Amino acid sequence: MLNRLFGFEVHSFLHFVGALILVIGLPFNKVLMSIGSIWLVANLLLEGNYKAYWELLKTNVIFVFVAVLFLFHVFGVFYSENSMEALSDVRTKLPLLSIPLGLIAKPLEKKYIRLILGAFLSMLLLTSILNVVSFFVTGGELLGDLRYMSRFGSHIRYGLLISFGAAISLHYVFFEKATFKFKIIGVALFLWFSYYTLLSQVGSATLSYLAVLISSLFIHFSYLNHSWSRKIGAIGLIGVLAGLISVGFSFFGPVEHNLNKTDLDKYSLSGNVYYHDLSNSRMERGSPVFVYIVDEEVQEIWNQRSQMDFSGKDKKGHTLKNTLYRYLTSKGLRKDKEGMLELTDDDILHVENGIASFYQRPGSSWSRLEEFRSELHSYQAGASPDGNSVLQRLEFWNVAFELIKENWLFGVGNGDIIQEMNRYFNISNSNLSSHLWDRPHNQFISFWVAFGIFGLITFLILCSLLFHRVVVDRNWVGFFFVLIMVMSCMTEDTLETQQGVTFVGFFIGFLPFLKT
């Protein structure tokens, strides 16, 4: 319609503007994400070339399954007890349908593709720099609190965007027939996004980043000219992977302790009686925390070295005494006068800031792994999963599967997931505190809980079709996107947030254009 009025292909340009608003808003602002989504569909309605749209949509099998998946959400409203929650879920999922519809019904012109990818990478670079500056300037680095790196939404979803940014950058280095200038930019961006991933320590983003890096190397080896070089490269990479897996099992493996009070010293060097609580399963660096404790000795030295109340809270709101005992244990020290005197001024500052392990102090690249290992060992000994995102997910999945056993065929409806999960948390007598009860945190499981086996199968087929399409087309950037999407859905309810569903919806629609 507007083409005749303005005398040029104005709708193609407006389509580009809508996509540009979306990719700018994706790492930055929810309002821009909403505007971009509405813009794409409104432009189609204004152009009014409905017959051409329909021909493109009906032959795109990926869009067909996206539409079917969305229809499950619509039907779920009618058999959910909490219909308002189900309607809210439909509204959240709308970009999953509307954005691919806009991009598939009216494909973008090729001249706009690099501009859109460039805008996406530029916004990732800008927002990540602002996040890092905020982290160091506002005190997040001293506190070891990574929430200071989440200025533009969920740090988990943002971490996935960073992983995808690293994948696009790596593509320009390895595969794209780009100029030397573009390859240098690609290397710089990849190094920065790698640094950001390491600094932010978001588990799902780190796993996605590693998957991108490893698969990229495998793909790169497949392009080598000589078969012997391909084989050597593949064998070397497999060897490295096997080594990493072996180290991982050793690092996170269970630790057996057969301690009893007769094995432990009874008195400190100052002659005071040690307190040993072997029934407490709290572990740090593979050692029990609540042994070799003399409260009065620890408190005396603490009061000499800190102004914070020994019986109060640290700066993260945790019981300071427990944080101190964990920190001492992580350094292999007893909780007595001699152990306290071994602590440096920096150690005291770390405890005040709520850092519970010497190996989780600011600047430690392994702090997230150390934290997880400590929590895992405690969980294996029967402790509560409270406070650890990975262990909480294990509880979520266990409860969700109990719910699935009784509702495996049709599910409970997308409006009743939370209330039904809460009911099963009660039934299972979970060790997880009630204020931490939540959704399954696995998109595959969530669809099974909500829509039964048919919803799960539909989503699995959609993921399979996406993988098949990108591999057949040798669309390696598209492959990295699908890989990141699927991996995130294994540990997160990726499609339950605006940023997550917009990310998936946009790049499903943009998939053919990723083969640059």
Image (cartoon, rainbow, N blue to C red):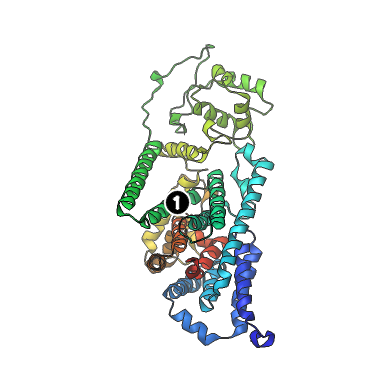
Q: Circle 1 — which element?
A: helix
Q: At 61% across and 55% down in the image, what residue appears? A: 153
Number of marks present in the image shown: 1
> Could one spot residue 316 in this view of the protein?
no
Q: In this view, does 331 lie to the left or right of 309?
A: left
> In this orientation, which residue lies closer to the viewer: 362 or 327?
362
Seen in the picture, residue 147 relative to 110 is either above or below; the reply is: above
| Mark 1 residue type | Leu
Seen in the picture, residue 100 relative to 244 is either above or below; the reply is: below
Image x and y of residue 301, in percent:
62, 19
Quadrant into which the N terminus falls? bottom right
- The residue tagged 1 is 213
Q: In this view, does 100 lie to the left or right of 37?
A: left
Seen in the picture, residue 309 relative to 489 is either above or below; the reply is: above
> Could one spot residue 118 in this view of the protein?
yes
Query: How many residues crowd mark 1 within 10 Å: few (<14), some (14–19), many (20+)?
Result: some
Q: At 46% across and 26% down in the image, what residue appears? A: 277
> In this orientation, which residue lies closer to the viewer: 65 or 46?
46
Image x and y of residue 82, in percent:
53, 67
Image x and y of residue 479, in percent:
43, 61
Q: At 56% across and 50% down in the image, what residue appears? A: 188
Q: At 36% across and 59% down in the image, what residue appears? A: 405
Image x and y of residue 425, in percent:
46, 52
> In this orientation, which residue lies closer to the viewer: 416 or 506?
506
